Image (cartoon, rainbow, N blue to C red):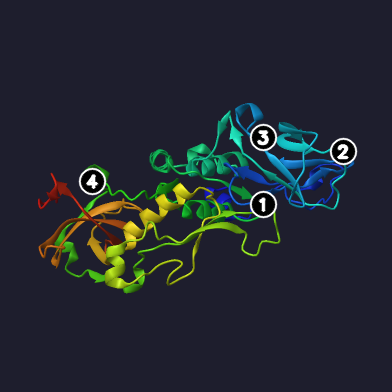
Amino acid sequence: MSLQSLLTDVFSLRRASIVAGPEFPTDILPILYGDLIGGKGGVSYCPGIIESTNTYLIADHAIVSAANGNTPTFYSDNVITVPTSWNDNDTVDGRPAATVTFSTSLSGTRVGYRGMGKATGGVFLTNPIWVIYDFLTTVVGVSPSDFDSTSLEAAKAKAYPYACAGILETDRSPASTISEILACFGGYYYIGSNGKLVLVIDDGTTPQMSGLSGHIRSHEFEQAEASWTRADVTNQAAVAYTKNHYDISLQQRFQDIDDGAVTADAASQRVYGASGPGVSEATLEFPWCRDLATVRAVQSVIVYRLATPRARIRVSSPSFRLAHLDVGDHVGFSWPRLSDDLGRPLINQIGIIEEVSINADAPSVDLAIRDTGSYLLNGSVRDRRDYY
């Protein structure tokens, strides 16, 4: 099966019917990642897999053991209930799984779990890029060779400070899942021109010369078009997080919210007014985040990128000189008809590619670029040299 099909086809999780005597055969067997903390009560639903022995499934894989710091709490209809035993690395239908057993029947109640999620090779997975890599390779069946190795390592490093935690409990395309995870951490993915999966995390930094994928010449901007819109301004970003997958009585399922005031851009708000999620539009939802420090780190990146209106530029580069560019690449560009913040010609600005289209008849490479607001540096000032 192709990488595209693996990502876009609906992927079905296993059901409790794989074993004999489940309480509800149609229950989905969940996959847990990260430290399921925060909020109140249970976090994840445990399906009953062997009703006769009061055995429930915590996760359809091994989880962090007690010896490695997992101290789970179990619930029955949101009341803490102490089990007879729990097994971090049991076997269910011939595959590793985590289970819990109670001394008396809990039939008809909703059993819940709060604790740590998947460990692979003894490693507790909390880095969002590692979570995506593990999900795609060990669950979905994507080959490690299908990843663009350079971007994978770069994304892992940028995501290292972030704590990812969440639950897979529905049948849907893996593309939907990884998009949801990445969106919680300022990231995105695409299939590169080499057919490899590219994962990107925006940590608020912009590369300098060594990180640019190309430079667009000033004469190529003679027919370029730029647009700015006030609607793009985000100077405050409210986030709902700590999603609960157990208590179905919770209307919104999110148990924590941060209004974004701590990471708001006061200067932008004085000019444009308060604008962004939770202020002028719907609050962002981070279902794969349960850690306030991570939420605020991502909020800071969003506000840093969007507190000032930035140009979106459409430009056509003759020939195939820039045919190697991909979505997400950073490029340098010079457009003397525009000015920088000091009124000087815009030289060696840095943009990020949002669209690439190759016109084989012209020939030309048509690009949509979003200005990052950053530029190449020569020491501590703008580099005004030509790089053609």
Tag 3 residue: 62
Query: Contact (CB < 8 A) between labels 4 and 2?
Result: no
In this rendering, is residue 172 above or below 228? above
- In the rendered structure, which amino acid carries the disc numbered 4? Gln
Q: Earlier in the sequence, mark 4 or mark 2?
A: 2
In this rendering, is residue 78 above or below 98? below
Toward the viewer: 357 or 71? 71
Q: Earlier in the sequence, mark 4 or mark 1?
A: 1
Foreground disc of the pair 2, 1: 2
Q: Earlier in the sequence, mark 1 or mark 3?
A: 3
* CA neighbours of label 2 inside 10 A, class few (<14), some (14 to 19), many (20+): some
Q: Earlier in the sequence, mark 2 or mark 1?
A: 2
Identify the residue at horizontal 71%, vertical 36% (top origin).
97
Tag 2 residue: 53
Tag 1 residue: 169
Q: Earlier in the sequence, mark 3 or mark 2?
A: 2
